Amino acid sequence: MRIFNATVGFMLLGLAVLHGFIPKSPLLSVIYAAGAVMALVSLWRNISFGTARVFAFLTVAAMFFYFAAFFRIVDHFHENWYRGGMALEAVGMLLSAFAMIPVLSVFSCRMKADCVEPGLTSQALFSAPDEEKDEASAPG
């Protein structure tokens, strides 16, 4: 998951840089950069519950913005939609929206995993506390 989130972060950072050179849409550059920051912050291992909650909320907001922007763009498509620049913009928005789902998943797991100590592997996010493991393995 960490490699995928890093890939998402760098993809969104690339889109932010590309949109920085388009004078028509500087706001999109900021939104892509914000998504990149969220994806790269999800790579940190020791995030507090409150920080994870704030970033989860921001990730949902960015994801819905990407979906809303995609559906606004799709409304203007014609029969040769794939030949214009709007098609690339729409694909970027759609990919960005779906790519934010695993980022949100990481923040949501961090909020649920209060038993996980910082510095453990990411697989520990899906483990149970030691007390519950002992109770489950006890006979009868």
Image (spheres, rainbow, N blue to C red):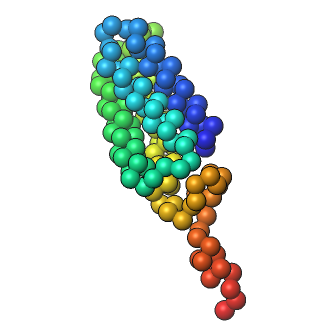
Residue occupying the point 49% across, 39% down: 41
The one nearer the camera, 49 or 96, is: 49
Residue 21 at x, y = what percent? 41, 8
Q: Quadrant of residue 37?
A: top left
Furthest residue to the bottom? 140
Q: Which residue is painted at 64% across and 55% down in the image?
A: 120
Residue 93 occupies quadrant: top left
Whether residue 82 is visible, yes or no, is no
Quick one: quadrant of the N terminus?
Answer: top right
Height in image: 107 above or below 6? below
Tally the marks: 0
Residue 5 located left or right of residue 63: right
Residue 62 at what x, y percent from top left? 36, 35
Q: Is residue 2 above or below residue 16?
A: below
- Closer-to-camera residue (75/61): 61
User: In x, y percent, where is residue 131?
Assistant: 60, 77
Side of 28 relative to 94 (left or right): left
At x 39% / y 40%, what residue is drawn? Answer: 59
Q: Is residue 64 visible in the rendered structure shown here?
A: yes
115 on left or right of 88 = right
Q: In this view, does 2 lie to the left or right of 25?
A: right
Q: Residue 111, relative to residue 89: is it above or below? A: below
Q: Find residue 25 and report its image quarter.
A: top left
| Quarter containing the C terminus | bottom right
The residue at 38%/37% (across/down) is 63
